[in-house]
Image (spheres, rainbow, N blue to C red):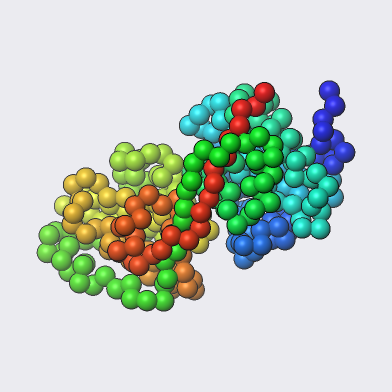
Amino acid sequence: MSRPYAAFGIREAAAADMAALARIASAALTHDTDEAASLVARLAAPPAHRSWTALVTRDLDGVAFVSTSARDAHAGHIDLLAVRPEARGGGLGRALVAAAEDWLRARGATEARFAGNPPCYAWPGIDVRYTEAACLAEGLGYERYRVAWNMTADLTGDLSADTDLARLAASGVTVHAAAPGDRAAVSAFVEEQWNANWAWEAEQATGCHYAVREGEILGFAAWGSRPSWFGPMGTAPAARGLGVGRVLVRRCLAEQRAAGMSSAQIGWVGPLRFYARAVGAHAERVFWLYRRDLP
């Protein structure tokens, strides 16, 4: 059967193509140039159980990362679509989407999404500033079904937590950086309280902090499981109201500042009010999530 993308020579990328894929992303992702290469590296190292691929054009001017969902067997994700600016306008983006949809159909998907596939994803959806990508999705019949957002935290201000730490200590709660030997216990806590996706992110994170009382973990926060982002973070019901979350987020953000960052993105945010009050974060990046049935 004829494929509409055959003329572009689209194929599955090989390990030797990874440097070229990073260059494509760096050229295409004009709002994320500095992070583009690390995004490609992150998507190319997902959880071991994930079925995924990167589809690349013959001339190495466009790439689509695609994966199936572990949560919903009928859903597939276009995790990243990038086309060099000089190659746009000739149908290359449409061809990559068509190839991605065929790859997903072959693996049983009945729905395709421009939406993050936790726990390893580029963004929650299409950043509204990438107008061409949103137009492409809508032109191909994708339906916008949800809105998500990131908050930005300024790391140049006061991130101290000494007063809060002293207050917690008086209640028997201490906060620690998770050393390599602690990660398994923290991950088990996260999976029990929330889900396996967050547990994987806690394991992969560059930095992770946790609160404990009488040997029981009460909360955690992580950063760097997705390049330069803060999160995930959570506190157990027994800890809510103690101020554990405020300390954990400040400890992580201070660590990100020490790593040379001046700001941090808090990804796929739920509690806007908490982060606004705890660290003065503000909503900044907005994402549209799209989906369509695969006929």
Q: Quadrant of residue 69?
A: top right
Q: Is residue 102 found left or right of 7 in the rendered image?
A: left
The residue located at (31%, 38%) in the rendering is 192
The residue located at (17%, 69%) in the rendering is 166
Position in image of residue 132 (x %, y %): 68, 51
Q: Is residue 91 found left or right of 109 in the rendered image?
A: right
Q: Is residue 281 above or below residue 210?
A: below
The residue closer to the viewer here, 191 or 136, is 136
Q: Is residue 17 visible?
A: no
| Outermost residue to the left | 170
Position in image of residue 29 (x %, y %): 66, 58
Q: Is residue 163 above or below residue 20?
A: below
Q: Is residue 159 visible?
A: yes
Q: Is residue 195 above or below residue 259?
A: above
Q: Is residue 203 found left or right of 291 in the rendered image?
A: left
Quarter containing the N terminus: top right
Position in image of residue 53 (x %, y %): 67, 39
Quarter containing the C terminus: top right
The residue located at (81%, 50%) in the rendering is 89
| Outermost residue to the right | 7
The residue closer to the viewer here, 80 or 293, is 293
**Label tally:** 0
Position in image of residue 15 (x %, y %): 72, 47
